[in-house]
Image (cartoon, helix red, strand yellow):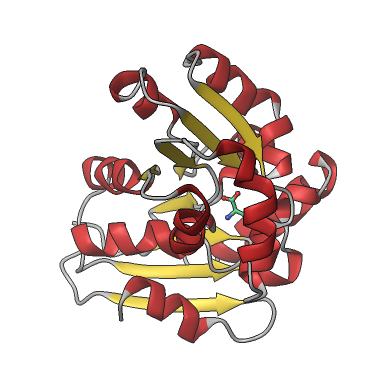
Amino acid sequence: MDNRPICFFDSGIGGATILREVVKLLPNEGYIYYADSINNPYGEKSKEELFGIVDNVVKNLLEYNPKIIVCACNTATAMVLTDIRAKYPDIVFIGTEPAVKVVFDNYKDKKSIVLTTKGTGESEKFLELFHKYETDNCTLVPAPELANLIENNKDTSFYLSNLLKEYVGTEVVVLGCTHFPLVEDEIKNVLGDVLFVDGSIGIANRINSLIKKNNGHGFIKIISTDRDVEDRILNIIGK
Ligand code: DGL
């Protein structure tokens, strides 16, 4: 048994789409969720700047003596998590990557797009993964600004309709940013009834297989670096 908390971080509310799957599977764990809204969007930062930002987040989370730190952000995983792991070799980190392998394994024949932030879409780590599982039917579609629109609770309809109108006919959409599951309805308004794929259930299963369990009562503590996003995060998790 291990009663230390599981810590999460993201550039705001998006990582809660991962947390909700983990809480469903492991309701008795203690969770610290660090919403770094003030630094949103991570996807528009340089690698050096983002390393400093994430290093600071990790230092804050280490105060809670976590048993594991979940980087609930595709962008931070793609751009800086390798270097963060090297700096903190004793800490167990779990990253988040766009679920391109799911398309390769199951939907090779379907017309697919992978939606990412600018940072993820241009990163060496992600492009290596994307090309490894590339299929003729799968197209990479970076969506700069989308994470920031979602974080700021802005209407995304106009943005999505401009970005996605040339992809009508798509059958599978990989949500390669943890903010993007929050606009599934708006994406459907442009593309119709597509199938969405993300990494959240895979991450929940991986955490379940890695940790020693807590025997206490579950709790969720939310820390935000900007305005109060606690209600939105609890709403995403369904609490
Ligand atoms: N949720 C983050 C991700 O998965 C958003 C990135 C951003 O802040 O640009 O990529």
Q: Residue at x 40, y 72 (%)?
A: 236
Picture residue at 63% right of the left edge, 36% below the top: 141
91 in relation to 58, above or below: above
x and y percent of residue 152 in the render? 67, 74
- Viewer-closest of 64 and 31: 31
Residue 120 horizontal side relative to residue 25, left or right:
right
* Position of 57 relative to 93 (above/below): below
Quadrant of the snapshot with the N terminus: bottom left
Please tell me in which quadrant of the rendered image residue 107 appears.
top left
Above or below: residue 221 compared with residue 171 = below
Residue drawn at the location 63% of the way across and 38% of the way down: 166
Residue 122 location, x and y as percent?
73, 31
In the picture, the quarter occupied by the C terminus is: bottom left
Q: Is residue 142 left or right of residue 135?
A: right
51 vs 155, left or right, is: right
Side of 191 relative to 35 (left or right): left
Q: Position of residue 57 (x, y in %)?
A: 65, 60
For the question of whether residue 52 can be seen, the reply is yes
In-front residue for pair 124/191: 191
Query: Residue 238 appears at what percent x and percent y?
Result: 31, 76
